[in-house]
Structure formats: structure tokens, C-alpha cells
Image: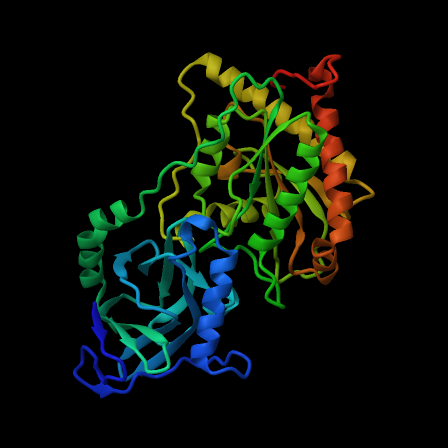
Amino acid sequence: MRVARPGARTCTSAGAHREPRAAAMRIWAFPLALALAALAVLATLLAPTQSRAADVVAIAAAIEHAGAETRLVFTLSAPVEPRVFAIDRPDRIVLDLPRVNFQIPAEEGARAGGLVASMRWGLFAADRARVVIALAGPATVTDVVVTARDDGAHLLTLTLAAIDADAFAARVDGDADAFRTASLRPAIAPEPAPADPRPTIVIDPGHGGIDPGAIAAGGVEEADIVLAFAERLRERLSESGRFRVLMTRETDVFVPLGERVGFARRAQADLFVSIHADSISSAPQVSGLTVYTNSDEASDRESATLAARENSADALAGVETQEARDEVADILRELAARETRGYSHVFATTLVEGMDGVARLNKNPHRQAGFVVLRAHDVPSVLVELGYLSSRRDIELLTSEAWKDRATAAMTASIDRFFAPRLGHRADAAAVSP
């Protein structure tokens, strides 16, 4: 990587000189330097304490064309040290960065041009950000440069050039070990709870960070919708005092699918509830809440399609899915898996009944499919699609504070009913696993 001095002209890999260009985005009527400073201060105030001093703000991304080359230009508040990798299946370029606060709408990543089919960006871990560039054809990064401008902005520019399939495969092989190391993440550890007799509920807000999930026409992101709902549900459950409540993520950060399940198992969870809000742009008439349980055979084609889409979250973030499909080594484990599936179905039925009248239910509200996040053999698990971001009616509910209050109250009551036979007669709700 090269860092150019303020106001300097930069030289691309092809040798053609150019002046650094600002990406096409204006922040209200303020000068860019003032806007960057304001965003940096806001990010500092809103970010967790341990990362406040380190946040760099990204306010724009642009695709530029220069002959046979394609350039990606990110406008940042400070310089960064990027690392670049090539990965395949499908062909992508991955750009790893220190922690960056992306103030760019995720829907902007759908823009395509030249060698770029689409992009996505966001936090990959608490202290790292990642940009994943889906390629329109095999390509390599010929140049990465950071240029400082007189107004305080910094431009991070990647230059892409087309190569043949064999050359791309060789680049992937050469990057494999370094990329595997770069993608390692510490396991998220649940809070210790020694001698806590209460049932443990793990709430899993889907998506997050580099994976925003579904995006509504107005820019509403699934990751934000489900995190807000999960936080409200946690408050409801915690207020009762009857449950120990944990969440797989509490901020807008990416968590791999298998790690979500691993978190629940390490916490010895008695129930795992994954919260989502899908989108079907081709069928905006589809709406309503649906509860899914795990099955190798999907109950219908729509459920199989949804499971395949949700199971691709890791690949979209540039990591290999570590499936939580535990290999059943003996008959005792197989029996445990069967018992767990039974409890999952019981809770799904209880939840559908409890949500009827509070949420608009899908015409077939309890379905089955092979979701990776539901594959723990020893934790009853469900995936709840709160609604569809492709439905205007559902968006109105999902963004309504009054509806979230009613829906989380009904969900809490359903969880109470599910555990009631196992709570005994103690007022403090000491319990065993279902």
C-alpha cells in the first residue's frame, strides 16, 4: 500500500497520472472536512468505550472506470492500512481494514460497474471491518493507495484489472493461508452463570455488520430491525426475573452462523430464538410472521429457498460456514437430537398460538427447513421471521414501537407457557431444561 502526501498527484499501476477525485456524496451543506469531523465525533460518542479512540468514518464509496481498469474509491476520515485477498466460489476480492464506522447506506453496495458486480461492507469483528467485492469476472487488485486531501479527507483507492481464470485461481491459492488466518475470530463467550437454576434463553438477532440482511426500498435494514426487537425481548424476559437471557450480538457486528449455535451450546441454553425479517421483492404481497424449526427436508419450496439464502450469510461475508450439524456418533446422541426436535416443535406451536392476534401470521405460520443456526442437537431452537421488508404493511409494524411492545409481550408469555410445566411450584422459577 502507498500513502500519498496531501494534495499530491497519484500514479496508478498503469502509469497514468490523475488527480485524486472526491466520491459523489454531499453531507448537507457543510464543508467536507467539517462533516468528517462531525461524523467522527458522533461515532466516538456512540461507539463502545474500548473502540472510541480508533474509529475511522467512511462516508462514501464510488466506482470509477479507467479504460480496462475499474477503481473503487472510499472516502474516509483518516488513513487506514488495508489487506487484500482473493477468494473463490464465487469469485470475490476481500478488503480487510481496522475498525471503520461505515456511514454509507448498505443498499449502495448493490451498484455495479466494470469488474464489480456488487459490494458489501461493515464490521467483521469488534475491532475489524471488511469489504467484500463480488466480481463480474476474474480480476486482481493491481494497486492499493491511500491519498490525503487538503480538506482532511482520505481516499482509499483499489484498482482492479481483468485476468484469466487460471491466474485468478493461482491468486486464490497464494492468498489462502493468509486469508484463513485473517478470518480467524475468537469464540464469543457467554456470561458465566454459576449455580443459576433459571432457564437460559439465547436470543439471536440475525445478520449484522458486513451482513445487513434484507434491505427495504427505503433503506431499512433487517440487521437493525431484528436487533431492536431482540433488545426489547431481552428487556421483557429479564424484567420477569424468571430467565437468564443472553444475546449472540448486542451491536451491529457480524457473527458467523456456526458461532451463533456454538454460543448457545456453551451457554447451555434451554432455548434458542433466532430473529429475522426477510424480503421477497418478487412477491410483495407475501407478509406475516412465520416460525421455523429445523428439518433436513423442507416443508415447502419457499422454506427451502429461505434456508438456502440465510445459510449463505457466511459466504457473503467472506468466510466458510462452519456448520453446527453435529455428527451423531451413538444412539444416545441421536435420541437427544430427536427429543430436542420435539421440544422445538412444541415451542413453535406455543409461539404461533401466542402471537395469533398480536402479529399478522403467515398463511402457513409453522414451517420447517434446514437452517444452519437451528442444528444444535441439544438446544431447542426456532427461527422467527417477524415479517417481510418487501411488504409495506409489515414494515409499518416492524418499525412501530407500540407493535414491538405487544409482540415482545406475547413472545415472553409464550416462553413462560413453554417452561411452565418444568418450573415446578417455585415462585422464583427455578427450572430444568425442557
- Horizontal side of residue 271 vs 192, given as left or right: right
Q: Which residue does the image show at 57% across and 22% down from the upper left?
A: 340
- Work out whether residue 111 can be spotted: no
Residue 246 percent coordinates (x, y): 56, 34
Above or below 74: residue 223:
above
- Horizontal side of residue 403 vs 26, given as left or right: right
- Horizontal side of residue 383 vs 163, given as left or right: right
Seen from the viewer's position, the closer of residues 259 and 2 is: 2
Q: How many marks?
A: 0
- Work out whether residue 352 can be spotted: yes
Q: Which residue does the image show at 28% across and 87% down from the upper left?
A: 19
- The colour scheme used to paint the residues is rainbow
Above or below 378: residue 371:
below
Residue 225 percent coordinates (x, y): 62, 53
Above or below 321: residue 426:
above
Residue 310 percent coordinates (x, y): 51, 47
Seen from the viewer's position, the closer of residues 185 and 13 is: 185
Quadrant location of the N terminus in the rendered image: bottom left
Quadrant location of the C terminus in the rendered image: top right
Q: Which residue does the image show at 40% across and 25% down from the upper left?
A: 327
Residue 139 percent coordinates (x, y): 26, 67
Question: Image quadrant of residue 5?
Answer: bottom left
